[in-house]
Image: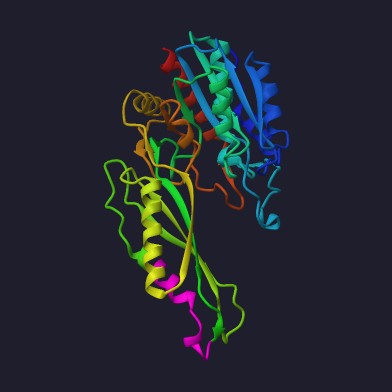
Amino acid sequence: MLTTDPVQLTAKLVRCPSVTPNDAGALTLLQDFLTAAQFSCRRVERGGIINLFARWGKKGHPSSFGFNGHTDVVPVGEETAWTYEPFSAKIVNGILYGRGASDMKSGVAAFASAAIDFVTNSPPDGAIILAITGDEEGVAEDGTLALLDYMEQHNERMTACLVGEPTCPENLGDALKIGRRGSISAKFTAIGTQGHSAYPHLARNPIPALAQLITELSNHKLDDGSEHFGPSTIEATTIDTGNKATNVIPARCSASVNIRFNDQHSASCLTRWLQQKAGTIAHSFNIDVNTEVTVSGESFLTPPGWLTELVANAVAAEVGIKPKLSTSGGTSDARFIKAHCPVVEFGLVGKTMHQIDECVSVSQIQQLKSIYERILQMYFG
């Protein structure tokens, strides 16, 4: 019986310095690994980003389970602050260190290893699809979206998908994500009239206007939450004039907010509300306020049902914990996949992701592989 080592594969992937948008050989490594196991692989390139589509089994099979993940990572930050070189994949006392160890090269290694062992040891009546991107930590326009476009163009389809992002806050098995909040960012630019601070009547100061706008937005309660989501939040992220003079009223001031919203809102409705608030402030202070909104994703939910139960039961069978259904955290590529097929997320403990000395327990990588293999067994069983 074949047993593929997910720890060794994780280490090889971590040694690829694949900071977005650089691939640094990570997807080539995976392509060679999967091709040797009889997966049909295609590199999907768009906008300078490399992605990988891999399928075992017949194209278009009505029972096609998919895994999604990414091999790109965030920058290492202050390299001298790391205990071990950030792309060394050093293993000390059962812990593997390196950028991407937690988020999420271990997850990719676990589901790739699980898929290979499963199709080799007990070939299913169905197909397994791996959709792996190199553009999740960036703007994400040419990553999973490019893979989904490729699948649409070539009549490829997943009937269910699991995203292997870190989902557990404390212990492996304690959380399964069934949805995510939406996210929009708004930048307000207030335009007044520059003048001498001793003669304010000859100027129009944009700072009090934006201060008032940010205060009102920060104090506003959008909702009390919903059945599966906590309350939506509004957070101010910056306010700046770039003014270095203490005796000059600036002509411009900018500020930004980020809204994480639940299923009671849509990005379009929130955008109109922000524009209305900015317009009211502009009128009150006799200045102009320009509003630019960037939508990262809408909120979405995979309602509790067969897929959530299947994954939760597989987790419980392997680690003895039935995960809590959660919608917390930031955005993920599941926001794109939800329009393609039912999708959930389950992966390792994410305490150290994006941090200095990012790391993962070797034993948990092995456990995660076992969980993923059991999910496949139950899905095709």
Coloring applied to the structure: rainbow
Q: What x and y, as percent, mark residue 381?
A: 41, 12
138 lies left or right of 345? right
Quadrant into which the N terminus falls: top right
Q: What x and y, as percent, mark residue 75?
A: 65, 50
Pick the front one: 2 or 310 = 310
Magenta part of the chain: 197-215
- Residue at image location 32% in from the left, 62% down from the top: 220
Instruction: Spot the residue most to the bottom.
Output: 198
248 lies left or right of 299? right
Pick the front one: 346 or 1 = 346
Q: Dividing the picture into quarters, in which one does residue 251 lie? A: bottom right
- Residue at image location 59% in from the left, 77% down from the top: 243
Q: Is residue 146 visible?
A: yes
Instruction: Spot the residue most to the right.
Output: 24
Note whether 108 is above or below 376 in the view shown: below
